[in-house]
Image (tube, coloured by chain):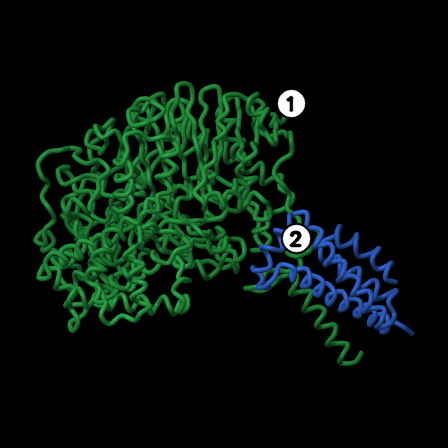
Amino acid sequence: MIFFALAIFLPSLWLFPWWAQPLICFSLGLGLTKTWSLQWQTALVAGVSAAVLSFVRDGQSYGLISKRMAPLIGLPHPALLFVLIGALTFVFSLLWLRAGALLRHRLAP
Amino acid sequence: MGAFNWVWIFITLALTFFLGRGTASVPALGPLLEIHGGIWRHEKFIPHSMALPGLKNRVQVAVDANGIPHIFAENESDLYRVQGYVMASQRLFQMDLSTRVAPGRLSEWVGDRTRELDRFFVRFGMRDSIAETMKHYQSDPKTVEMIDAFVDGVNAYIDRLKDLPPEYKIIGQRPEPFDRERVIDMDKALTFDLSSRAMDLVLTRLAGKMGVDQVLDLFPERYPVELQDYVAPGFGSGKERPAERAELFEGFKTQLKELPFFPLQPHGKGSNNWAVAPRKSTTGFSMMANDTHLNFSLPNIWHEVQLVTPEFNVYGVSLIAIPGIINGFNHKVAWGPTNGTTDALDFYEIEFENETSWRYRVKDGWREAEVHDEKIRLKNGGADVVQVVKTHLGYLMHREGRLGLVANWMGHRADNELKALRGLYDARDERECLRSFKTWAAPIQNFICIDQKHIAIQHTGAIPERRVGEGRFVMDGRGVELTPMDERVPEKLQPRMEDPPSGFVLSANQRVVDTRYPYFLGWDYEEPFRALGIRRDLSAKNKFSPEDMMAIQNDDFDVEAAMVLPIFLKHLDTSNLSKEAQKIAALLKAWDFRARAETMEPAVYHEWFTQFRRKLFADSLKIDDVEALPQIQRVVWLLERLDKNPKDSDARWLERASPKRSSLNDVVSDAFAEALKRLTENYGRDSSRWLWRLKNGVEIPHVAKLKGFGTPILSIDGARTSVRGVSHRHGPVYKIVVAMGDKKPEAWIQVPGGNDGDPFSLDYGRFIDEWSKGEMRKVNFYESRDEAKAAAKQWIEFSPEDR
């Protein structure tokens, strides 16, 4: 499941706008991630993917994005921006994975 | 579904909504932080070749190793079109933001925080003024062509923009197409910044409390020779002009109970320029130095560029959102301004026919004011409506029943400044350079022009012909028939100096003419210290090299401290000082008056002077704004007088400020103790840590003041009162030295912050370190495309779209 989630999230985060994330997570919750444990793992993969990809993007700009954005949003260190993005993506993904799973449960006979 | 699940779904939807929309204070984090297109992605510059709509011929741009574009075009229209495109590609957000100030359009983006500022500018008549100036510009087809081509270039960039500059993403806005007015908007914003300092309201309030004669004493028009400097000393030499006297103002006292808030531009916004004649130059040709002191910002307000057509080849800096070059040089001449500082803003009390009427009293009856409403759009979609009231004396800023206060500003009366600047590009000598300024009205500037053999300085612009004392206080508008400031000083009496016997000309926003000049120009000029410093430096040697000129630009000798500190130390009562305080006093005694960033002496001296000035005037005159206090030179004069004669009439100011401890020794000693206390509170007990760097606090903020997008406090030598005039948020944002030559000039330049305004590019903070250290870089002034191409880091070809 981890590799599957990586194969989904790495390209989707890179290629699609932010609102594609809830659609993907909702679909995954609806069809694939049946247990809490799987939902957590999938959300974690999404969070880590987002943190890694933002780190890569930042590297392409010589680390200047995190350096400037961190103070702007009140973070004491640039590296915390990746942590924030990872955490935000994790929570957001988990919420929508769970929402998908809830709907499946509701629809189940 | 259980309650937990409903809560879960609610939280999911709420977070999604929050990420997508944000709140009033938090931007929409979803689109902002997304990997795909958020702040992580920002498109760079322009491809190597591209078609540009409207071009007539091919245009080439060589970007050199310093990131400076050199634009080669076959005609002017193509040149400005590509300049617009290139500038927008590097500075779009800054152009968009800065051109919203004058027309009162900041609230569309910012919301409530800028609402009052927008209302102020609209009420002040800025929108009318922009439209009026546009009419002037439109009467000259070449100016229209210049503006239109530039604006088309900017819009071509906006049309092709795939990814917004990061600031737009952060504030959640999008650029809108530019129009001709945007060029004027920027012009007006800078003109207001440079020519709207007026103490009239402050002095009127003070005169109401203490009398006109006392105000004239504290804010004098004239100073002793050693405390004064002039741009054009001796010009128009005739009879001694009558001085201001209290009796001149006895006829009228305003009946207005409240005087409105009017932003008081701080002192220190100014510039330096000087030139040396060939006989004072080691090169055998004229040389010029210029540094413009404006508000610090990242990106810099200037955009460095070389513009080349078959008709001209000119290098320098353009102002963002304005086509062409403002300051710079061509093969034959170089030019550079400082702010003229001559009074350009007056206030009149007017009387309406009744409490609701817009008819106001004039000499022979009543006249109808022009009244119309203007809308200010707000961020939340709403709108403010501002009533704009125009009289022949200016715009209404305040009304109390039948009485009103109008502001009459010279900046509303523009001519065609772009045409004046365009004339400089192909000027062949210093005279042609000066003649180009015939259509320059505002802001009034001290322009230096040099060619290979000649140097000149001219107080340039529409200089109002004033009565002595006119513009000191709020004036009576009831009997004023003609529009004030429409009468100008005749051209032949426009202050200037050409090839003076001294071999140099200089200006640093100081007084322009001495008392033998026939007209009164105003009294509130910049402090004379920078000018005195430059004069001292230029008088110290017989010949100057370009390196000497750069060294003068970096001169951190604090002229004010050198005048004041010996008197302070002489009157400091050391008998009650602690050991630490005595040590500090001893260090000050040994100080060489150099305002070095990593030393403590300048910090102690300036805090001491601040406390002395505050003790003397702030409390007793009830003035909170330090910019409205009597000038530093007045305090220096007071010190010199009381030092020589303790019973001088100035002793009354000490008594008024501190009745119980009113000797000079008392006030000086108390100010010293207070200064040490303040420094301890701010920087700790260890006096070796009271660094000038920290006290002066030079930092360069982002143009929209985004936290993290500016610099930390920089270590830079100099003070507001040294030639290297740096202070917290003002200083030399552009420095150049031009040495004219036999075939072509050589130039050295420094512009802190690179040309590329993308905060996530390496170029954004470029040259700040070099600038802080006082280093200059050699300008690449190319003669031809081939020369530029051979040295280019990037070569871009623009071609007409239909080919």
- Sort mark 1 into few (<14), some (14-19) or many (20+) by Cα contacts within 10 Å: few
Q: How far across and how far down the image is residue B269, in percent?
A: 34, 48
Mark 2 and mark 1 on one chain: yes
Indicate whether A27 appears above or below B297.
below
SS assignment at label 2 = loop
Q: Which amino acid does label 1 sit on?
A: Arg
Residue B336 left/right relative to B574: right
Pick the front one: B418 or B368 = B418
The residue carrying mark 2 is B38
The chain painted green is: B
Alpha-carbon span between mark 2 and mark 1: 36 Å
Q: How far across and how far down the image is residue B780, in percent?
A: 50, 29
- Sort mark 2 into few (<14), some (14-19) or many (20+) by Cα contacts within 10 Å: many
Pick the front one: B176 or B270 = B270
The chain painted blue is: A
Indicate whether B44 appears above or below B402.
above
SS assignment at label 1 = loop
